[in-house]
Image (spheres, rainbow, N blue to C red):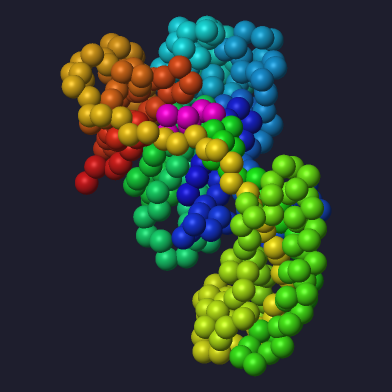
Amino acid sequence: MSGDMGGTSFDIGFVVDGEPSYALRPDVEGFGCNLPMLAIRALGAGGGSIAEVVDGVLRVGPQSAGALPGPACFGLGGKRATVTDANLVLGWLDPEYFLGGSKKLDREKAMAAIEQDVATPLGISVSEAAWLIKETVEADVGRELGALRKDMGPHPDPLLVVYGGAGPLHSCAIAQASGISTLVVTPFSAVFSAYSSSLMDVGHLYYRRLDLPLHEGADLSPVDQAVGELRRRAEADMRGEGFAADSVGWELELIVRSDAGEEAKIAAPIDFHHSPAGRRAVQEKAAALLGLDGNPALTLCTLGLFGKAPVAHYLPREVPATSAPLDAAWRGQRQVSLHRRGPAVGVDVYDRELLGNGHQVAGPVIVESRQTTMVIPEGWSLKVDRYDNALIERMQ
């Protein structure tokens, strides 16, 4: 599973057995589409999400202060209380080390905004209001993440990949709310979308409607005709982008429908229909995805041809085990509110850049980098692996 929390939204999705979550009938801004897309749930919960009291109840998002004017603590004219303001008031963020110290945050403006928008309307302290903002956004996202887990099928403990600048601040609490116990924060988490684009090959996908029966003995000769026509289009497009035909790899995407009208998308070799074993494999995979037993009646309603040409990728490299003591990464302590009520307490802060392969810390602890801040609460631990990822796990 993946969770991306930036300034405006928290986007979640999943990958199962190498296949990302897809919506076959996606909704785009309220309009139904007939083109399959990655199924990404975008929640109005980011660092800039505005907190306000409506009819006596706190609501966080979906409205956002954006980057300009941004949260009140940015000092760019924003007056509304946001999630980032709450994190600053609670002590999770260092006002002197935001973006590695390139931007200073104004704690007084954050407190004033939270007092005006949340604390005074609810009749509670600023600190309690800030905690309530944090608690609300984490509960909202945790509930949605728990619902997404059900769409994955029988995967009892998925790995949650956390990214976005604000994601690691809230990831453990969100994971706890959704019953997830293992997380990973890569060294590129704050720019994960840009980093991931460096791992992609160049590809194009072409669709053709077929509506063919998919059973043993069915005539699938129209598949060859469709593949041939689509392949000629694809080779022309790829040639225009500088790729020779022999450098392009091919795969089919099949959208298969049951008699009840349920549909599933599956990947298949380009020549699956040329052998009984290939047809049977597609039928069995489609039946399993559709939750059907036996030899159900299926229809190959849409065929997609995916052409992909490889390009050079950034390759993560293993780093040797560190010989530096853990104390070398210690930055000191910061006063942090660990509970909704009660005084702030001193929490150890570590420099992420100085944590190496083999270093491990147990919560409550804060791990800061120039791009993000990781909050590791009590009952959780963080360990750096040989690829410089931060593995965060719930302790038994």
Q: Is residue 163 left or right of residue 302?
A: left
Q: Is residue 334 left or right of residue 309?
A: left
Q: Measured from the top left, where is residue 229 in percent x and y?
A: 80, 67
On the question of residue 32 being in view, the answer is: no
Against 214, residue 375 (above or below) is above
Residue positioned 33% across, 38% down in the render: 392
Residue positioned 59% across, 32% down in the render: 194
Q: Is residue 359 left or right of residue 149?
A: left
Residue positioned 67% across, 24% down in the render: 66
Residue positioned 61% across, 18% down in the render: 71
Image: magenta residue range: 186-191
Q: Is residue 384 left or right of residue 33?
A: left
Against 386, residue 330 (above or below) is above
Q: Is residue 92 magenta?
A: no
Identify which residue, 78 or 183, lies in the foreground.
183
Quarter of the view holding residue 315: top left
Identify which residue, 322 or 175, lies in the foreground.
322
